[in-house]
Image (cartoon, grey):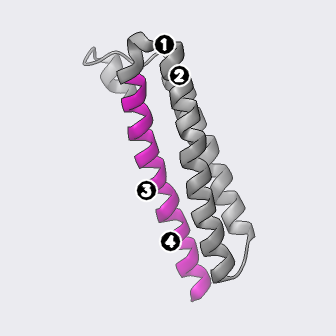
Amino acid sequence: MYVGHRQGFFPFPSYGWEIIFYMAFSTAAMVNILLKKSGPVLFTQLYLLTIVIKILAGSVVILFIIFINRREAFENAALFIITYILFTILEVTFLYRKANNQGT
């Protein structure tokens, strides 16, 4: 994203760094919470709860950003969706590897 902006392919969204920081912080917090809990049933319930919390909090954040800057709403929303997907893939991969290492 940064390289594309520096090369002039597209403008960097006005709240780009804030969105990236929010997604990184929320993903790290969720993984930290999940790694401290033990037991497969508790882990599953907490994982589902963290997904719901992340979606609700993310919805509030992106709606707030869209209402603040309607002119760049599409760019900010697109970056939010891309970072949400990437950080979710990172979170699932990290938790999957951690779960497999503990199982062996």
Residue 63 x/y as whole percent: 52, 28
How far separated are the C-alphas under marks 1 and 3? Answer: 28 Å
The residue to which callout 1 is attached is 69
Label 1–label 4 contact, CB within 8 A:
no
The magenta segment is 75-104
Amino acid type of the residue that numbered disc 2 sits on in the rendered structure: Ile
Q: Which of marks 4 and 2 is nearer the N terminus?
A: 2
How far separated are the C-alphas under marks 2 and 1? Answer: 6 Å
The residue to which callout 2 is attached is 65
From the viewer's perspective, tell me whether residue 90 is left or right of residue 8. right
Q: Is mark 3 on a helix, strand or loop?
A: helix
The residue to which callout 4 is attached is 96
Q: Which of marks 4 and 3 is nearer the N terminus?
A: 3
Residue 89 marker: 3
Residue drawn 27% across the image and 14% down it: 8
Amino acid type of the residue that numbered disc 1 sits on in the rendered structure: Asn
Residue drawn 63% across the image and 50% down it: 28
